[in-house]
Image: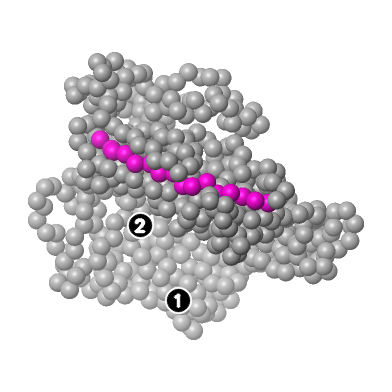
């Protein structure tokens, strides 16, 4: 089991527990109980493994006192275990507590070894990655923080007059940090900020940036200003442009009103890092997840969106959204996606009935029973209205699956079994229709062994990931750095055709580098292996070397009828690490 994949379990009244492990091999078990010392143990998992017994000892005590610069106690400070990588593994033991009036804290169930802790208190800079050993009194001194003061003036872009009532939101990485109401065209925001530089692994980290979102009734919101989270005073002046929202009525496929339908208007600039579609669902029913509808991001990182629920007559009203590009209506009876400028003068939106996809998954000659499947929009879904759908399900014991509520569109359904596989199939869904597909059962098994030679001693030779992808022509794809040209290509038929043609498979490597894949069709493939550290910083606090990307071409010959049970053994594939510069 990977140290990143923590699987929790609780003991019963007899102290017994059970954990399911995907494959034989070494796993780490972590045990934690109040009043006892937390323990960890490496266990070699084999078939019919006898019960693993832990005899817990009395808990170790980690205690200390949190004080300010003058030595005064800081009450109500939060003390908690951190989760950095320790020795290449994630720190699993979890505890949190508060200091008393004397600034003291105590944990009586700590393991015998030191752990990493973090301490924070209102008005003070937090202290992170503190390594505290048990059975020793610790003194932790926090530095009092400073303030960032943001003042601003908000006016009408045309009249230049102050706007009386408006709302100001401060956000970081799309998360709202603070929100206030402004009056008479002016506002003031005050936030505590660090006085000491933040660091990761001993390396100083640049202060984050806050985005400033200003909204007022009858105006388009503005997210054009940002400030660094540094102590001091900052003044911004923002002019809002008047804008009209949208209103209308949602109708069911039979033309009657659709009460309690969710209506969403999305706008802003689409990020160039990839298709950040507005709809992303985690279960088969989109209607059950109306609240999961989200919109593409604005230039400052926060979403520009508006949402409403229709009344008994199907009517809705939405606030103004800048650069509005997509309008959605979602109801248990159907779905609609349109470009806002194409909304009729009547404001009527008629829902299309949900489509459905049924099928079977076969792995080799066997049903793909209980293997996770993911449905996603085929292609990059960057044509207005910008829509990306992601749904999940599992086939039954016979490999049969059913996606019951799917918007009309073109989709790929892919096996997402942990660590390997990638059988997939495509389906076109039309309103009210059922599409049936078969996934897997073609191609042939593929085996081999990957060996990495010439590894630099300072770089871990562990393979982080390995995948196989069908080799396609270059197609003169523009570089993503040229955002306009890349987006234009992504919206082209050539990009959609490329998505239809592409096939990729994840490899699950055993400890000796061997692998097996099922159902690989004929073609020329590129094997891509990522080797080396996955962290940007080493544990010593110095910049770590970047992972290496190694590739190797593989040819799977044609098979009569497109299927063969004969395994194609690729033998040992030796990949060479580049010479150290």
Q: How many marks?
A: 2
Residue located at (42% from left, 29% from top): 549
Residue 412 rendering spot, x and y as whole percentages: 41, 36
* Residue 436 visible in rendering: yes
Residue 245 rendering spot, x and y as whole percentages: 72, 55
Residue 531: which quarter of the image? top left
The residue tagged with tag 2: helix, strand or loop?
loop
In the image, residue 559 sits, relative to residue 251, either above or below, namely above
The residue tagged with tag 1: helix, strand or loop?
strand
Residue located at (27% from left, 26% from top): 442
Q: Which residue is mark 2?
A: 91
Using a 10 Å C-alpha cutoff, classify the residue at mark 2 as few (fewer than 14 neighbours), some (14 to 19) or many (20 or more).
Answer: some
89 vs 537, left or right, is left
* Residue 206 visible in rendering: no
| The disc label shown at residue 152, or none | none
Q: Which residues are magenta?
A: 347-362
Residue 419: which quarter of the image? top left
| The disc label shown at residue 98, or none | 1
Residue located at (31% from left, 69% from top): 110
84 vs 511, left or right, is right
């Amino acid at each position: 089991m990977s140290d990143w994949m923590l699987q929790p379990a609780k003991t019963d009244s007899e102290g017994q527990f059970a954990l399911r492990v995907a494959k034989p091999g070494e796993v780490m078990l972590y045990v934690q109980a109040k009043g006892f010392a937390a323990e960890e143990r490496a266990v070699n998992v084999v078939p019919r493994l006898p019960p693993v017994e832990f005899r817990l000892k009395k808990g170790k005590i980690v205690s200390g006192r949190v004080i300010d610069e003058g030595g005064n106690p800081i009450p109500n400070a939060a003390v908690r275990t951190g989760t950095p990588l320790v020795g290449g593994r994630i720190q699993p033991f979890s505890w949190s507590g508060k200091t008393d009036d004397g600034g003291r804290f105590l944990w009586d169930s700590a393991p015998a070894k030191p752990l990493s802790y973090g301490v924070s208190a209102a008005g003070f800079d937090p202290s992170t990655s503190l390594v505290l050993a048990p059975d020793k009194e610790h003194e932790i001194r926090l530095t009092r923080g400073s303030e960032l003061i943001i003042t601003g003036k908000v006016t009408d872009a045309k009249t230049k007059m102050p706007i009386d009532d408006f709302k100001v939101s401060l956000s970081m990485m799309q998360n709202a940090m603070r929100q206030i109401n402004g009056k008479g065209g002016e506002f003031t925001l005050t936030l505590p900020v660090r006085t000491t530089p933040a660091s990761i692994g001993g390396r100083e980290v640049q202060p984050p940036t806050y985005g400033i979102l200003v909204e007022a009734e009858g105006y388009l919101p503005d997210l054009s200003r940002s400030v660094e989270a540094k102590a001091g005073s900052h003044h911004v002046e923002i002019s809002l442009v008047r804008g009209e929202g949208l209103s209308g009525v949602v109708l069911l496929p039979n033309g009657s009103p659709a009460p309690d339908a969710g209506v969403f208007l999305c706008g802003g600039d689409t990020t160039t890092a990839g298709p950040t579609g507005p709809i992303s669902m985690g279960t088969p029913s989109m209607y059950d997840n109306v609240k999961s509808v989200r919109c593409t991001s604005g230039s400052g990182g926060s979403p520009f969106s508006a949402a409403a629920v229709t009344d008994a007559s199907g009517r809705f009203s939405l606030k103004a959204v800048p650069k509005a590009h997509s309008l959605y209506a979602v109801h248990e009876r159907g779905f609609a996606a349109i470009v806002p400028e194409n909304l009729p003068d009547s404001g009527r939106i008629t829902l299309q009935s949900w489509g459905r996809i049924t099928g079977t998954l076969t792995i080799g000659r066997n049903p793909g029973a209980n293997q996770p499947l993911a449905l996603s929009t085929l292609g990059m879904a960057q044509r207005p209205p910008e829509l990306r759908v992601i749904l999940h399900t599992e086939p039954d014991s016979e490999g049969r699956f059913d996606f019951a509520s799917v918007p009309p569109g073109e989709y790929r359904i892919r096996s997402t079994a942990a660590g390997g596989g990638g059988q997939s199939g495509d389906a076109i869904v039309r309103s009210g229709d059922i599409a049936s597909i078969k996934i897997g059962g073609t191609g042939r098994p593929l085996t081999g062994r990957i060996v990495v030679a010439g590894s630099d001693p300072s770089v871990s030779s562990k393979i982080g990931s390995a995948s196989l992808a069908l080799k396609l022509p270059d197609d003169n794809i523009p570089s993503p750095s040229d955002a306009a040209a890349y987006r234009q290509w992504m919206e082209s038929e050539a990009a959609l055709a490329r998505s239809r043609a592409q096939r990729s498979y994840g490899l699950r490597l055993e400890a000796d580098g061997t692998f097996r894949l099922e159902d690989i069709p004929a073609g020329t493939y590129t094997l891509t292996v990522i080797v080396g550290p996955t962290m940007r910083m080493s544990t010593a606090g110095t910049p770590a070397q970047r992972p290496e990307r190694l590739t190797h071409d593989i040819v799977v010959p044609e098979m009569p009828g497109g299927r063969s049970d004969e395994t194609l053994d690729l033998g040992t594939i030796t990949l060479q690490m580049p010479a150290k510069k």
